Image (spheres, rainbow, N blue to C red):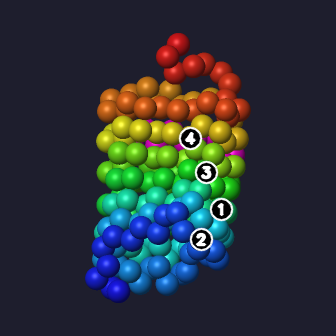
């Protein structure tokens, strides 16, 4: 299956973890996993999928933190980990994914502040991270993201000045 380009396993009854062997699917362009009982953390081997444009793992009981090695996925245009139990802080390295048009992280257990480095995502059109435990202030640099059309940040622990103030 090394020639496999698209893998969509949404809405099944799969269980278990995402196998580290996922990294062997080096032709993969689009990966959709979700709405099942897949769990565990994201295997670092997924960062071997350098052709990957869409990485969507939603409602799949994903746990653990986003590995900083995610920065190797320079072809990503969509990164979605919504409705899981992903935790930890947002790695600064996500800011290196400059082709991202959608970053969807809602409904997880992220903590800490959002890095201002994400303002380098100049192609970002949709940034959704509501219903987490992010705190502190929203980086003022986010107001300069010219292509951003959808910005959902509710139900977090933010304080300070609002971006539109």
Q: Position of residue 132 (x, y in %)?
A: 66, 42
Image-based side of 137 in relation to 53, left or right:
right
Q: Is residue 5 visible?
A: yes
- Choose between 94 and 154: the one closer to the eye: 154
- Circles 2 and 1, Cβ within 8 Å, touching? The answer is no
The residue beneath circle 1 is 61
Residue at 47% over, 79% down: 22
Q: Residues within 10 Å of mark 1 (few under 14, many from 20)?
A: many
Q: Nearer the viewer, mark 2 or mark 3?
A: 2
CA–CA distance in space, label 2 to label 3: 17 Å
Disc nearer the start of the sequence (3/4) = 3
- Choose between 76 and 5: the one closer to the eye: 5
CA–CA distance in space, label 4 to label 1: 17 Å
Q: Residues within 10 Å of mark 3 (few under 14, many from 20)?
A: many
The residue beneath circle 3 is 83
The residue beneath circle 2 is 13
Q: Nearer the viewer, mark 4 or mark 2?
A: 2
Residue at 46% over, 39% down: 127
Q: Residues within 10 Å of mark 4 (few under 14, many from 20)?
A: many
Report the residue that reaches farthest toward the top.
165
Q: Quadrant of residue 120?
A: top left
- Choose between 104 and 9: the one closer to the eye: 9
């Amino acid at each position: 299956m090394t020639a496999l380009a698209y893998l969509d396993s949404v809405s099944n009854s799969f269980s278990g973890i995402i196998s580290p062997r996922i990294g062997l699917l080096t032709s993969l362009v689009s990966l959709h996993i979700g709405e099942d009982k897949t769990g565990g953390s994201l295997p670092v081997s997924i960062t071997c999928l350098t052709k990957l444009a869409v990485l969507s793992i939603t409602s799949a009981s994903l746990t653990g933190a986003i590995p900083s090695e995610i920065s190797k996925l320079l072809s990503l245009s969509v990164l979605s980990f919504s409705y899981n139990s992903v935790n930890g802080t947002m790695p600064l390295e996500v800011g290196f994914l400059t082709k991202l048009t959608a970053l969807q992280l809602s409904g997880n257990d992220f903590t800490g502040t959002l890095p201002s480095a994400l303002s380098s995502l100049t192609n970002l059109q949709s940034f959704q991270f509501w219903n987490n435990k992010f705190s502190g202030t929203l980086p003022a640099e986010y107001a300069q993201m010219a292509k951003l059309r959808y910005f959902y940040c509710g139900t977090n622990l933010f304080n300070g000045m609002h971006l539109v103030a």
